[in-house]
Amino acid sequence: MLMIVQSAVNMTSDVEMQHCLDRLSAACDNFGLTISTTKTEVMFQPAPGKDYCSPAFTIKCQLLPVIDKFTTYLGSTLSRLVHIDNEVVNRISKASSAFGRLRKNVWNRKGLSLSTKLKVYKAIVLSIMLHACETWTVYQRHIRQSWGLRPRSYDKTGLRLALVLVLYF
């Protein structure tokens, strides 16, 4: 069984996108593959400064559903609004959860040195929190909106300060 899990197509016009979908459908037909139109979704992100208009794309005359938000199989969230607010909150939530799950076996364990605990923190918590952050465009307002406090007011041992420091440097 062959399957395409995710695919992103970057086109500059509706006509170009529909033509690309038609070519993809024809190529799949040539290889005996089927595109599930019930599982295929469309998310349109307009160019900055342009108004949003809901697209209408089809595959073999079947209208594809339009969505506002898409969660990838690795847990990142893409939004048609092209804001990272939801993604930052999602990442902090996942990292906080991982941090909490390590409480008994790492943070409260007397036999582990501080150096080892910091390595675990960097390897697990920070990697979860910063997954795909290289694609983010971060502004000061994201930090204020997501946490409600100015970065200087955080405890230096806090998880959120680590993200703020990484975003600043």
Image (spheres, helix red, strand yellow):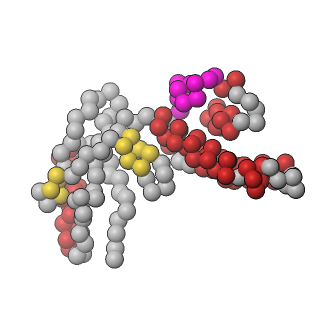
Q: Position of residue 68 (x, y in %)?
A: 32, 41
Residue at the extreme front of the image, as rendered: 104
Q: Judge whether 85 appears above or below 58 on screen.
A: above
Magenta segment, prevailing SS (helix, strand or loop)? helix
- Horizontally, residue 48 falls left or right of residue 15, namely right
The residue sitting at 26% across, 29% down in the picture is 51
Q: Is residue 149 magenta?
A: yes
Residue 140 seen in the figure: no
| Quadrant of res 133 | top right
The residue sitting at 71% across, 52% down in the picture is 102
Residue 46 seen in the figure: yes
> Of 160 and 134, which appears nearest the observer?
160
Residue at the extreme left of the image, as rendered: 61
- Horizontally, residue 39 falls left or right of residue 102, namely left
Q: Position of residue 132 (x, y in %)?
A: 53, 47
Q: Which of the image's four quarters has the N terminus? A: bottom left
Q: Which residues are magenta?
A: 138-150
- Horizontally, residue 36 falls left or right of residue 95, namely left
The residue sitting at 30% across, 36% down in the picture is 46
> Of 13 and 101, which appears nearest the observer?
101
Q: Is residue 28 magenta?
A: no
Q: Position of residue 88 (x, y in %)?
A: 53, 38
> Of 142 and 51, which appears nearest the observer?
142
Q: Position of residue 54 (x, y in %)?
A: 22, 38
Numbered circles on residues, count: 0
> Of 94 and 131, which appears nearest the observer?
94
Q: Which of the image's four quarters has the C terminus? A: top right
The residue sitting at 52% across, 42% down in the picture is 90
- Horizontally, residue 115 falls left or right of residue 122, namely right
